[in-house]
Image (tube, helix red, strand yellow):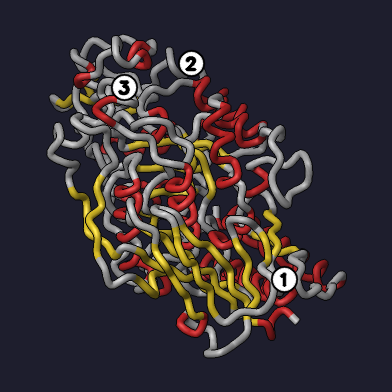
Amino acid sequence: ENQVLLRGAFKVLARSLDLYLARALRRRRCRSGASECAVTRLGANSIVRRTLPGGQVAFWLLMFLSSLSCCRVVIVLLCGKAHAGNNGMALTPPLTWRSWNQFGWYINEDVILRAAAGLIDTQRPIKNMPVGSSLKDLGYDEVGMDEGWTACPASPDMHGRDPNYDPRANMPRQNVSKPFDIGNNRTSMFHRLNADGTTSPVVDELAFPDMKGLVDRIHAKGLRAGWYLNDCLSFCLSLDDGCPAEQCIPGDVKAWHEYGFDSLKIDGCSAQRDTRMWAELINKTGTRVRLENCNNGPKPSKPIAEGGCPYYHQFRTGHDIVNSYDSWIGNAQEVAEYATTGRHGPGCWAYPDMQMVGVQGQTPDESTTGRYGPWDGGFVQPTITEQRTHFGLWCVLSAPITLSIDFSNESAVDSVWHIITNIHALAVNQAWVGHPGTVFMQSNRSIALRATCVQNTTCDNHGKGAKQRLTVPSWQAWYKPLPGNAAAVFVANHDAHSPAKVTIKFSDIPGLSAGELCTVTNVWKQELLVGAHTSHTEPALAPRDSVFITVHPRREVQ
């Protein structure tokens, strides 16, 4: 299998060098005031082109660093066996789609195929991209299913879910009368014992009549396919599955490989908890997997450079996200301890959970949220402004971006299309110059973050006020280094009621020199600001809104 991995690593390296040389041969000077120099992102199935001032220097440096990253992979493979986490995958934060946030466990083959079609759809224009471009062309390269594919004995009351309130609960499911016998006086929610003594996961054949065929159809669209194991089981009699890791992980990996999946999210609900076993068994299949540790095992305890992340490519940093601004900001705060200690970077990305951008209503989860439908309990849909802040924050944090939008909901897709296709924001997310991004300035005033609710409902404790989630500075500013001695700056005003005046002196941005003149690009507008600047002021940043700019020293763009 190392030969397979070596071929893949050399292919990426050769591609990187080819692009580097091709660009060098047709080098051109960027005109002052224009943003026309193409920068190429590596690490996905497609090339993402972005425009930034100083593109020549940025391009060469990014290509050089990408080549070094590939060389690192080759060296690892030559010197020792490559586990799932250091197989050359996820050198940039993965850009994907996964079902959970919008659909919960209400999924079937049609849901997954609609998502695949959405990623390759070319009907909507994408700013600064050629006509006929799609999300796939921007690097969104994978469709992943989450909870809901299993056949299992159903909960008698569907854990409180009432189809009279939420018609999705009427989705046909395979009838399983009781847990499966797996030997040794043990039972399982979704594993069966085979005649040869091995176990296999049981797929709901009403929802997914041909899992291998489904994966093949996703591949035919030029996309990767992702699966989900060590399941949480919202639909089932029990929320977890007790089949021991040593008994059930081998059969799970075998099924994953035979179906043809490319990536895997391993959750933390059931008993199949052993990231090393998962990685080693997957590695033996020869597939270059992208593996997500969703609280299945320990997070990195030492820097990536010291071997802190050998078994997976991204790891959940904390709590499950919900469709509320306070949840998004709370999850984002959890990335800092990994970003500042070398435990968040190429091949090992800290992950504050999937995106809620474009998601309509609440996600039905394993406990109480959304039991009576996506709009139950006084839920208020986050504004587009809040959703843009959510997306931008994940970009500046170098977090994996996993969409969950329902592409059949045209109005929902239209409302956030300018956000999820912003090539400048995505370029910031994908760039790597040694640091993933972290807070460098913040307000001295603190505020309490709570969910936004309809008054006198369950959400706001029937008029007593929503529960406080956390206390944060009223505004925060993050930075991330970019190629060419540049930086991205992202400022979010967390206050739900009051605008904020924010001034960022560029000399306060780590890595930039005092008094240096800079060109500035407004990422949200994808426009270069006129003139040269030493600071940026937002006199009245609206509640829950954000400033997103890239700052390039003038000496680097001339």
| Mark 3 neighbour density, 10 Å: few (under 14) some (14–19) many (20 or more) | many
- The answer to which quarter of the image holds residue 158 is top left
Identify which residue is drawn at 45% across, 62% down: 540
Q: CA distance from mark 3 to mark 2?
A: 27 Å
Mark 1 lies on a secondary structure that is helix
Residue 308 placement, left or right of 90: left
Q: Residue at x 18, y 49 (%)?
A: 468
Q: Are marks 3 and 2 in contact (CB under 8 Å)?
A: no
Circle nearer the N terminus (2, 1) = 1
Residue 553, relative to residue 225: is it above or below? Answer: below
Residue picked out by circle 1: 55
Q: Which residue is mark 3?
A: 373
| Location of residue 395 in the rendering, given as x and y in whole percent from the top left corner | 50, 57
**Outermost residue, right side:** 26
Residue 43 horizontal side relative to residue 293, left or right: right
Q: Which mark is residue 385?
A: none
Q: Disc 2 or disc 1, which is closer to the eye? A: 1
Q: Is residue 426 left or right of residue 48?
A: left
* Secondary element at tag 3: loop
Q: Quadrant of residue 371?
A: top left
Residue 361 in the image, given as x and y percentages of width and height? 37, 30
Q: What amino acid is found at the position of numbered circle 2 in the picture?
A: Pro
Residue type of the residue flagged with mark 1 = Gly
Q: Position of residue 460 (x, y in %)?
A: 19, 37
The image shows residue 153, relative to residue 318, as above or below, that is above
Judge the density around disc 2: few (<14), some (14-19), many (≥20) Cα neighbours within 10 Å.
few
Amino acid found under the numbered disc labelled 3:
Gly
Spatial separation of the CA atoms under disc 1 and disc 3: 48 Å
Question: Which quarter of the image is occupied by the C terminus?
Answer: bottom right
